[in-house]
Image (cartoon, coloured by chain):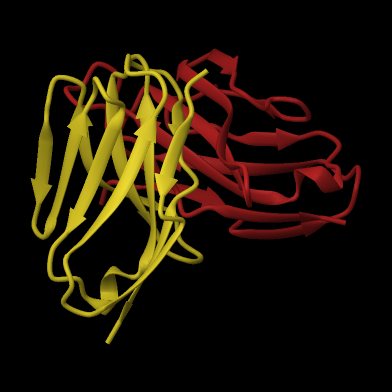
Chain colours: A yellow, B red
């Protein structure tokens, strides 16, 4: 059974710092991996999706990498801003149309 | 605007009183699903649907029903809610067979069962 773990569970940083969020999964046979952002009282917003054949994806200040063989992904946030404060969730799917298996998230606080 | 909508956003009810949470998407997606989010347990899939009239159980289907009569709608039905169904519920959709299958989530429905 696929399990997804995110470390750290919570992170507090000063504005401007570059930071890395970690995600690991137990079964390397994945279809894709998605990083989401969750704000209090709001739904999940997809940030980046990495297909199993890809190594990384970039969007603005965000970069996600995938090492499928070792079961790891990292989300790199450059020059963090207070508006980045949210919970970041990692999720994997194992086949097309299968459910997402989520980690419990990293709660990020960026202090002005 | 492409979106997934859910109603209601907040609901307080009592044990045993049937309720329905609606979900609608305007992206013509075949695949829709329901998740619940609980502290310490994360998000878990309740039910999913691959297309109209095609539904199947996820990881935690007990106490829930769904239907998919139209492509855009996927309501979640609690026939006899119990306090252990107090949770935050999310509906999601995606286009099967697309290059990436990005999942789009609704804003969530916070349910309290007394």
Residue at 69% over, 25% down: B61
Quadrant housing the C terminus of chain B: bottom right
Q: Residue furthest front?
A: A70
Quarter of the rendering containing residue B76: top right
Residue at 59% over, 53% down: B109
Q: Is residue A112 left or right of residue A105?
A: left
Give how far across and how far down residue B31 sits, in percent.
40, 23
Give how far across and how far down residue B14 sits, in percent.
88, 53
Residue at 13% over, 70% down: A79
Tag count: 0
Quarter of the rendering containing residue A69: top left
Q: Is residue A22 left or right of residue B58?
A: left
Give how far across and how far down residue A89 sits, in percent.
39, 48
In this rendering, the answer to whether B47 lies above or below A43 is above
In this rendering, the answer to whether A16 lies above or below B72 is below
Q: Is residue B27 left or right of residue A16?
A: right
Residue at 28% over, 69% down: A84
Q: Is residue B68 left or right of residue B15?
A: left
Give how far across and how far down residue B87 sits, in percent.
68, 50
In this rendering, the answer to whether A63 lies above or below B75 is below
In this rendering, the answer to whether B87 lies above or below A73 is below
Tell which of A6 and B11 is nearer to you: A6
């Amino acid at each position: 059974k696929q399990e997804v773990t995110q470390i750290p569970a919570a992170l507090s940083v000063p504005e401007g710092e570059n930071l890395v969020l970690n995600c690991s999964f137990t079964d390397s046979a994945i279809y894709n991996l998605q990083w989401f952002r969750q704000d209090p009282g709001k739904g999940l917003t997809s940030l980046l999706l990495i297909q199993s054949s890809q190594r990384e994806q970039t969007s603005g200040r965000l970069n996600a990498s995938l090492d499928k063989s070792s079961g790891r992904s990292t989300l790199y946030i450059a020059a963090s801003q207070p508006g980045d404060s949210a919970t970041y969730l990692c999720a994997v799917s194992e086949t097309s149309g299968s459910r997402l298996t989520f980690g419990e998230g990293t709660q990020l606080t960026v202090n002005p | 605007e492409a979106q997934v909508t859910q109603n209601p956003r907040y609901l307080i009810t009592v044990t045993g009183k049937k309720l329905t949470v609606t979900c609608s998407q305007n992206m013509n997606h075949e695949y829709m699903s329901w998740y619940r989010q609980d502290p310490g347990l994360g998000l878990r899939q309740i039910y999913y649907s691959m297309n109209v009239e095609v539904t199947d159980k996820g990881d935690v289907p007990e106490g829930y029903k769904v239907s998919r009569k139209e492509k855009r709608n996927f309501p979640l039905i609690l026939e006899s809610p119990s306090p252990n169904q107090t949770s935050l519920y999310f509906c999601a959709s995606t286009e099967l067979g697309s290059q990436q299958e990005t999942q789009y989530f609704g804003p969530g429905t916070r349910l309290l069962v007394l």
